[in-house]
Image (spheres, rainbow, N blue to C red):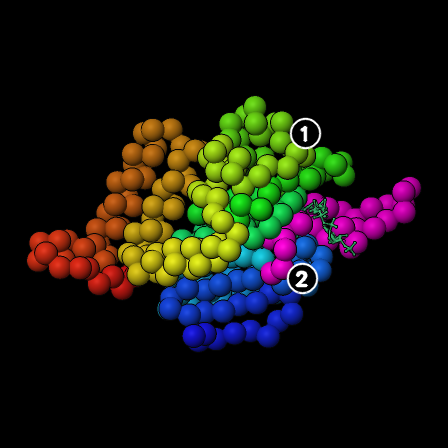
Amino acid sequence: MSDRQTTDKTILLDIADGVATITLNRPDRLNSFTAAMHEELREAVGEVRDDKAVRCLLLTGAGRGFCAGQDLSDRAVAPGAQGPDLGVSIETNYNPLVRSLRALPMPVICAVNGVAAGAGANIALACDIVLAARSASFIQAFCKIGLIPDSGGTWTLPRLVGHARAMGLAMLGDKVSAEQAEAWGMIWKAVDDDRLMAEAGALARQLATQPTRGLALIKQALNASSANDLDTQLDLERDLQREAGRTHDYREGVAAFVEKRAPKFEGR
Ligand code: T3D
């Protein structure tokens, strides 16, 4: 049962059982991004971040696609005419979105319900745990229109699949099936289409009962690791473990273990 629901047209936000579900909602355009959709998504992610009752975010798309990246009809310009400054679009919309998902102090699950192309693919891959329907696919479509992978793609892809595959995907724009993505370690899991939302929802509800501060610190540590050398990472682990050790949920976890009972984590 939903606690709250927005009435925004392009983004739906539903909060229940400690889980916020954000649904990209322009299905007739495969949930591609307009400026208005970016704005609504920014507001929704901000609301999730500020709501102390929310302990997991689930991101998905309405209809048969997850997200086809930038709405290209917003970019239609006559050849020869001066095009838009895409740097402004990236700086204003895509970069803040990826940063906000990575910084959100809770697990972010992406349920990729269909094709994820361009920025849509890289926004999905910026999430913490990615489940994809078997019929879904990932396409670095940028090269087909003369662009480069954005939304963190040039950072995320080589770390997930290695340089050779990242370069091939970025330059060829080939479609990667959900099963291939799982086999390459690009995503957590491919699941049967009719099970996607049930599995993603169950996972989100499970994570929402776990030590949220601890999970946020795990996310912080792992996300920092690829930029750090071992010494720096060891120092970071010391600092984050200190913080984790000061949480209520750590004390509860240890007490529950000693008392041989199930822990009751509160996310603090
Ligand atoms: O510009 C900036 O701000 C810089 C940032 C850029 C970030 C980016 O994401 S650039 C990359 C943009 N995205 C693409 O290039 C992908 C374009 N779409 C496709 O290649 C294909 O639609 C898909 C491979 C994703 C899916 O193909 P398919 O055959 O399953 O569906 P379809 O028939 O192509 O699409 C269904 C409808 O959605 C169709 O409309 P219609 O004909 O039914 O009226 C199609 O035009 C529309 N649609 C799909 N993607 C977009 C789109 N409309 C606008 N923009 C789209 N990106």
Helix, strand or loop status at disc 1:
helix
User: Outermost residue, top direction?
Assistant: 164
- Name the spot of residue 81 as percent of width and height, x first: 90, 45
Name which residue lies at 54% across and 25% down.
163
| Amino acid type for the residue under numbered disc 1 | Met
Amino acid found under the numbered disc labelled 2: Arg
**Residue 50 visible (yes or no):** no
Does label 1 or label 2 sit earlier along the sequence? 2
Please indicate whether residue 124 sits to the left or right of residue 51 in the image. Answer: right
Crowd around label 1: few <14 · some 14–19 · many ≥20 (10 Å): some
Please indicate whether residue 18 sits to the left or right of residue 45 in the image: left
Q: Quadrant of the C terminus?
A: bottom left
- The question of residue 83 being in magenta is answered with yes
Report if residue 9 is visible in the image. Answer: yes
**Which label lies toward us, 1 or 2?**
2
Q: In which quarter of the image is the N terminus?
A: bottom left
Lateral position of residue 25 relative to residue 189, left or right? right
In this rendering, the answer to whether 59 lies above or below 153 is below
| Residue 230: quadrant of the picture | top left
The x and y percentages for residue 51 are: 42, 68
Q: Residue at x 36, y 52 (%)?
A: 216
Spatial separation of the CA atoms under disc 1 and disc 2: 28 Å
Query: For the magenta stretch, what is the residue range?
Result: 62-89
Name the residue nearer the viewer: 204 or 195: 195
Q: Which residue is at the front of the view, 120 or 219? A: 120
List the residue tagged with mark 2. 26
Q: Residue at label 1?
A: 171
